[in-house]
Amino acid sequence: MAENIFLIGLMGAGKSTIGKQLARELGKDFRDSDSEIEKRTGVSIDVIFDIEGEQGFRRRETGMLRELVEKRDIVLATGGGAVLASENQQLLRDNGLVIYLRATAEHLAGRIRMDRRRPLLQSGDKLAKIRELLTQREPIYQQLADMVIETNNRSIPRVVRHISKMVEQA
């Protein structure tokens, strides 16, 4: 079984929710890179975006990923845009099993429709923005992933069991 498991995918794909349960199932520690950044800075991600912009946040994200990939026996939920930096891609690829949690834009929009903490979705048509982000990031997610798991219309326990079986066979 892989020592570290890294979950990638767009916001709303279930990385944190599935990651927590998967870590419990596999006897690993769970970490969420965005939560770790918030703990370190003492402010929310959207405040970091407001003050430092996306570029400032992405620098912090890379620094946090450098630290987190050094840990052992973790399930890590990454931020949806963490894969944009080639350094982050290399960090993930070199230090664990990368699993892409994939969902359609419509499913993602439905899951996060009430969430007001998503800096990239604060204005305009949320579904259109999600489609735009998917178009940009899908090729990176696919290329980086060791496994792709569809999460549309699947319960969290079912997804966790499926991933757990696949990880044990990997």
Image (spheres, helix red, strand yellow):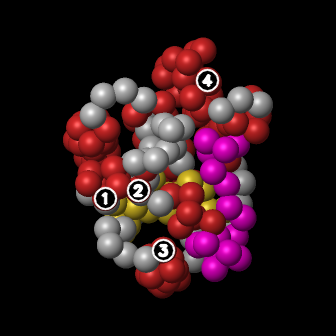
The span from disc 2 to disc 1 (Cα, nearest Å) is: 6 Å
Q: Main secondary structure of the magenta part?
A: helix
Q: In screen coordinates, is 41 left or right of 96?
A: right
> Would residue 35 be counted in the magenta stretch?
yes
- The three-letter code of the residue at mark 2 reads Arg
Residue identified by numbered label 2: 111
In the foreground, 92 or 31: 31
Residue 48 has which mark? Answer: 4
The picture quadrant where one finds residue 127 is top left
Q: Nearer the viewer, mark 2 or mark 4?
A: 2
For label 3, the crowd category at 10 Å Cα-Cα, with few meaning under 14, some 14 to 19 and many 20 or more, is some
Q: Earlier in the sequence, mark 2 or mark 3?
A: 2
- The three-letter code of the residue at mark 4 reads Ile
Q: What span is colored magenta in the figure?
A: 21-36
Q: Nearer the viewer, mark 1 or mark 4?
A: 1
Q: Position of residue 165 (x, y in %)?
A: 48, 84
Q: Earlier in the sequence, mark 3 or mark 1?
A: 1
Residue identified by numbered label 1: 107
* Quadrant in the picture for the N terminus: bottom right
SS under mark 4:
helix
